[in-house]
């Protein structure tokens, strides 16, 4: 029986009580009182861009269009020191049980450590890097078999489709990266992802799939998730019926078991439950309870990616994470990009009362990146108590959202430009594109990048009333056409969206999330907030048909179920 975690013997440092927090509050008051704006800061400091720009590998970061000065950066780094950020980071990296409410280590960074690190990280008696590489090697060997055609479906046909079933961290990462790295899918294997328990999701996704050439991956850390297990059973029924119908199997128990063995694999930490489902443990790829679901795309959870992209590309992907991990672990605070971006978010949330943060990729391939980041950031930092169970002492967890540019420009950017609230935004763009195109003489990618640059410039520097007037605008309309500017953005400019860059970007946001959680003193690695809804769904569902269960509901739920009953 597992023992319940004990309360940590000391409370996290209360950031709000630190000297740096007080200094930051005074600094914020001075800043607001001075009414100085971004344009003033650019004018006053010719080195501003240089001193607020950083490079990590192939990624260039420009933080200069944010609402901060060098003094702000200094004070934020003081805050990091006051809350012992570096000690907290090192505790995570060395495998201490920093996930206090689950009494677990938090070691997603071990997933990308090279094989040469075997023997250097022993946690709870396990050589975690050796374990990681043992599973990676099995994944790579399996992918080689599938990609080369030596692993086939039950009728001997080569696998062409992967149907991946999972939800949350067992889905969002693989979908996002698959979409982002489509140009690197080189083996003629396409992936389809099913997550929602809404039966329409599976029904639409299997439409047109050839069962003889489809491999199903069931991805679930716990292997107990209602959505995933329901969809897994439905997928098994679909596949076995379809194989029987097309004559690939005769429908006997023996033939069905053979089909499951050839067409189903699983990824989980609960290999006993995988076996109970009927999947041969030989066809299962494990990971560990020290990998949080939302931090797991670089574990066996990324198996669909290894199949589509190949082991070499997946290794490059891990290399990108590792590069950012090293930067995070080894760079002084003042030059450490995830630290600075995390502290900047704290500045916005806690000192400028900002509640949302946009992520706007200027790359269609990154169209699922904001959705991926929503789980990473909001499941991690949407917390109301600290690691020792005491209430938080400041706001936590802003809302992350976004869509790729330029689509967003024609939808919600109006509110970012002229709305009554400030919305910091991360713009992500790449110098090179997978599909260069010309429109006449015009390079279309440059047109696209021109939009990225125009938006960040317009948001920062705006347009004054005099400039509007000079265009001959009638006086009554001048105010409507003024852009105040001073709208904060970070520009992340990469050379190209490669597997390596993708890994580095994910690790960047993982560490930003950690930094914010560390300042707030919260456990960024549990997710108790999603449990109540799961329990209630189990308790409410019988009420659709059972009067006693209906009577046990609150008045509103009862009335909604009565509507259902009346119209079914
Ligand atoms: O409901 C939240 C959650 O626990 C996530 O943290 C997790 O990524 C997801 O459900 C899926 O869980 P599992 O991988 O165990 O099926």
Image (spheres, rainbow, N blue to C red):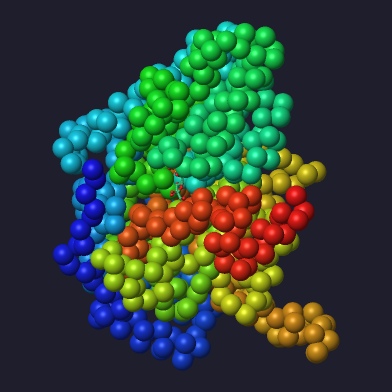
In this picture, is 55 found above or below 215?
A: below
In this picture, is 462 found above or below 318?
A: below
For this rendering, which residue is in front, 61 or 420? 420
For this rendering, which residue is in front, 47 or 437? 437
In this picture, is 338 found above or below 475?
A: above
Return the x and y of residue 322 as percentages of the image width and height. 34, 42
Task: Look at 20% across and 62% down and name the residue there.
Answer: 8
Return the x and y of residue 525 as percentages of the image width and height. 35, 54
Q: Does the rendering let one see residue 104? A: yes
Q: Which quadrant does the N terminus fall into?
A: top left
Q: Quadrant of residue 464?
A: bottom right
Task: Look at 62% across and 80% down and name the residue there.
Answer: 420
For this rendering, which residue is in front, 86 or 232? 232
Residue found at the far front of this picture: 548
Task: Look at 57% across and 56% down and name the residue there.
Answer: 548
Q: How many marks?
A: 0
Q: Quadrant of residue 160?
A: top right
Task: Look at 51% across and 19% down and name the residue there.
Answer: 260
Q: Does the rendering let one see residue 184? A: no
In this picture, is 22 found above or below 520?
A: below
Return the x and y of residue 123 as percentages of the image width and height. 19, 41
Return the x and y of residue 362 as percentages of the image width and height. 61, 52
């Amino acid at each position: 029986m597992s023992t319940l975690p004990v309360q940590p013997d000391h409370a996290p440092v209360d950031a709000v009580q630190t000297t740096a927090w007080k200094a930051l509050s005074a600094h914020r008051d001075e800043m607001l009182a001075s009414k100085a704006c971004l344009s003033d800061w650019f004018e006053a400091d010719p080195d501003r861009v240089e001193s607020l720009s950083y490079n990590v590998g192939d990624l260039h970061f420009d933080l200069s269009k944010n609402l901060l000065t060098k003094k702000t950066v200094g004070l934020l780094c003081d805050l990091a020191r006051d809350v012992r950020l570096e000690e907290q980071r090192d505790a995570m990296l060395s495998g201490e049980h920093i996930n206090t409410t689950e009494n677990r280590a938090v070691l997603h960074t071990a997933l990308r450590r090279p094989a040469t690190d075997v023997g250097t990280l022993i946690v709870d008696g396990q050589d975690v890097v050796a374990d990681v590489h043992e599973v990676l090697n099995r994944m790579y060997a399996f992918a080689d078999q599938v990609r080369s055609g030596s692993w086939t479906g039950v009728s001997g046909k080569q696998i062409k489709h992967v149907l991946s079933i999972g939800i949350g961290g067992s889905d969002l990462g693989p979908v996002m990266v698959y979409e982002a790295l489509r140009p690197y899918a080189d083996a003629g294997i396409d992936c389809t992802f099913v997550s929602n328990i809404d039966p329409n999701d599976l029904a639409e996704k299997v439409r047109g799939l050839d069962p003889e050439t489809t491999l199903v991956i069931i991805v679930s850390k716990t292997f107990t998730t209602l959505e995933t297990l329901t969809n897994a059973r439905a997928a098994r029924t679909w596949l076995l019926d379809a194989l029987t119908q097309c004559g690939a199997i005769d429908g006997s128990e023996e033939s069905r078991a053979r089909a499951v063995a050839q067409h189903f694999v699983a990824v989980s930490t609960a290999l006993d439950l995988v076996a109970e489902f009927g999947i041969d443990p030989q066809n299962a790829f494990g990971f560990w309870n020290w990998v949080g679901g939302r931090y797991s795309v670089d574990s066996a959870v990324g198996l669909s990616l290894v199949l589509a992209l190949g082991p070499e590309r997946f290794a490059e992907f891990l290399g990108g994470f590792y590069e950012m991990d090293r930067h995070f672990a080894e760079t002084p605070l003042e030059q450490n990009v995830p630290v600075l971006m995390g502290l900047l978010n704290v500045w916005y949330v806690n000192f400028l009362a900002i509640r949302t943060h946009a992520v706007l990729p200027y790359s269609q391939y990154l169209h699922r990146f904001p959705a991926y980041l929503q789980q990473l950031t909001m499941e991690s930092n949407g917390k109301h108590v600290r690691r020792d169970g005491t209430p938080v002492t400041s706001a936590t967890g802003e809302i992350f959202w976004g869509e790729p540019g330029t689509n967003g420009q024609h939808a919600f950017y109006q509110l970012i430009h002229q709305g009554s609230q400030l919305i910091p935004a991360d713009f992500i763009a790449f110098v090179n594109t997978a599909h260069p195109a010309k429109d006449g003489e015009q390079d279309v990618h440059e047109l696209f990048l021109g939009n990225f640059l125009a938006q960040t410039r317009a948001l920062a520097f705006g347009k004054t009333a005099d400039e509007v007037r000079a265009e001959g605008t009638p006086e009554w309309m001048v105010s409507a056409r003024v852009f105040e500017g001073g709208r904060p953005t970070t520009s992340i400019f990469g050379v190209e969206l490669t597997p390596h860059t993708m890994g580095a970007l994910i690790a960047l946001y993982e560490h930003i999330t950690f930094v914010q959680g560390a300042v707030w003193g919260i456990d960024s690695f549990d997710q108790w907030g999603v449990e109540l809804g799961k329990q209630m769904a189990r308790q409410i569902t019988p009420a659709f048909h059972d009067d006693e269960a209906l009577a046990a509901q609150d008045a509103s739920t009862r009335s909604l179920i009565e509507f259902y009953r009346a119209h079914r």
